[in-house]
Image (cartoon, grey):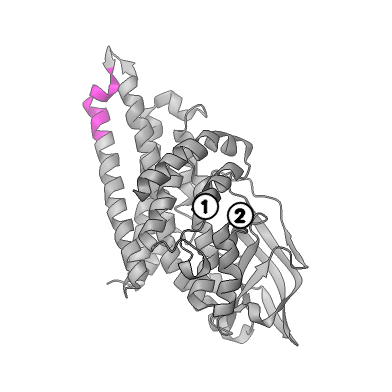
């Protein structure tokens, strides 16, 4: 029922704008409005804070269905979870009430600030500093590759509070867009997900109250990594949705397109391609849903499962969308058809929230 209702909403309110959002590289406001109107912009927020209280699997299904029609729009529910999960996992009750309530109401989105110009895969090498000054923390630094930066109202920011301790000297904070000293760089010009702004976040003597720290001092990096164990599964869901959208479109196309006097769907070479695409998507879906169940239970092997789901599903998305372009031939290579957009969008799923090379390192270190 959830899938059917979300799919119907996406087909009616999000899909019609997907091509224009990509072409104009603009934020998908129509998608945000539709998601907020249906309480789908942050379904993971617990009921205690006015949220839908969706479990990890329901959240995955919502993201998957949005991504099936528009990958840029799927970053609204996905990044709202990424940005706010550190508060849910480690924040004080007061902090949760203060920030989860407006998120659940659709009054503000959440972004996640971990990466920096010189700290990508080696996130512990970050340079952003937070220094205590009386009853405040003062933050200075630059965060890079921040999804939905400038649109989001709230930012979970990782910053160094003790430079002598490397990862154990990193703490997490909530910064608000309206805090004095917060500014944003120009939107990155990207290959795909063009409707989701990616910008640098500049912190210039940003003074915030002490109670905006998430958890204890020095626990920020551990919270960041624990968050990714859960949210890598949302990237798997996004990849899954993109792949499904590409397969669905290609399937329809090959039945209509005629060559040599019959639909190209009648040719075995085409049938085998479609069979492989569908098989890989189903394998990715099984792995993703299993990882979502483990995320909900907090199973001991979640780190491995989350990395495996993200890595496998994103590799599948890249293969499937590339094959979808091939199935449409010359038409697939043009912007008149959605599969080239899906192929460009799929690429980022192999890169963000840890490259697939990093996922393989994570899996190797956490073999069940």
- The residue under label 1 is 75
Query: Seen from this angle, which residue lies furthest left?
Result: 268
Relative to 4, say whether 57 is above or below.
below
- The residue under label 2 is 148
Q: Nearer the viewer, residue 287 or 29?
A: 29
Q: Main secondary structure of the magenta part?
A: helix
Q: Nearer the viewer, residue 76 or 343?
A: 76
Q: Quadrant of residue 135?
A: bottom right
Relative to 26, say whether 154 is above or below.
below
- Residue 242 in view here: no
Q: Residue at x 53, y 60 (%)?
A: 80
- Tell me the SS state at disc 2: loop
Q: Nearer the viewer, residue 70 or 281?
A: 70
CB under 8 Å between discs 1 and 2: yes
**Residue 43 relative to residue 114: left or right:** left
Count of numbered circles in the view: 2
Decide which of tag 1 and tag 2 comes sooner along the chain: 1
Give the percent coordinates (x, y) of residue 77.
50, 55
Give the percent coordinates (x, y) of residue 127.
65, 73
Give the percent coordinates (x, y) of residue 19.
54, 34
């Amino acid at each position: 029922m959830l899938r059917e209702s979300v799919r119907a909403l996406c087909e009616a309110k999000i899909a019609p704008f997907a091509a224009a959002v990509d072409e104009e590289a603009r934020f998908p406001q129509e998608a945000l409005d539709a998601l907020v109107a249906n309480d789908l912009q942050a379904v993971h927020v617990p009921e205690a804070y006015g949220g839908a209280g969706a479990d990890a699997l329901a959240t995955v299904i919502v993201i998957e269905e949005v991504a099936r029609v528009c990958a840029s729009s799927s970053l609204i529910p996905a990044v709202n979870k990424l940005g706010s999960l550190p508060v849910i996992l480690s924040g004080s009750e007061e902090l949760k009430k203060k920030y989860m309530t407006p998120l659940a109401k659709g009054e503000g989105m959440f972004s996640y600030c971990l990466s920096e110009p010189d700290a990508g895969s080696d996130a512990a090498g970050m340079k952003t500093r937070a220094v205590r000054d009386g009853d405040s923390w003062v933050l200075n630094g630059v965060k890079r590759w921040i999804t939905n930066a400038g649109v989001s109202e709230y930012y979970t920011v990782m910053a160094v509070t003790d430079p002598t301790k490397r990862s154990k000297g990193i703490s997490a904070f909530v910064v608000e867009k309206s805090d004095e000293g917060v500014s944003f760089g120009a939107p990155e010009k990207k290959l795909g997900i063009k409707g989701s702004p990616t910008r640098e976040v500049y912190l210039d003597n940003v003074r915030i109250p002490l109670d905006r720290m998430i958890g204890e001092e020095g626990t920020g990096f551990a919270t960041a990594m624990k968050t990714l164990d859960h949210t890598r599964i949302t990237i798997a869901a996004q990849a899954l949705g993109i792949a499904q959208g590409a397969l669905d479109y290609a399937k329809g196309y090959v039945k209509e397109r005629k060559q040599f006097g019959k639909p190209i769907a009648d040719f075995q070479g085409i049938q085998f391609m479609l069979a492989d695409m569908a098989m890989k998507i189903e394998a990715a879906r099984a792995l993703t849903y299993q990882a979502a169940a483990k995320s909900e239970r907090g199973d001991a092997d979640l780190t491995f499962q989350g990395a495996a789901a993200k890595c496998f599903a994103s590799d599948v998305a890249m293969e499937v969308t590339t094959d979808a372009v091939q199935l449409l031939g010359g038409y697939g290579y043009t912007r008149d058809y959605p599969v080239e957009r899906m192929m460009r969008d799929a690429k980022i799923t192999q890169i963000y929230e840890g490259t697939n090379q990093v996922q393989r390192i994570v899996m190797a270190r956490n073999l069940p």
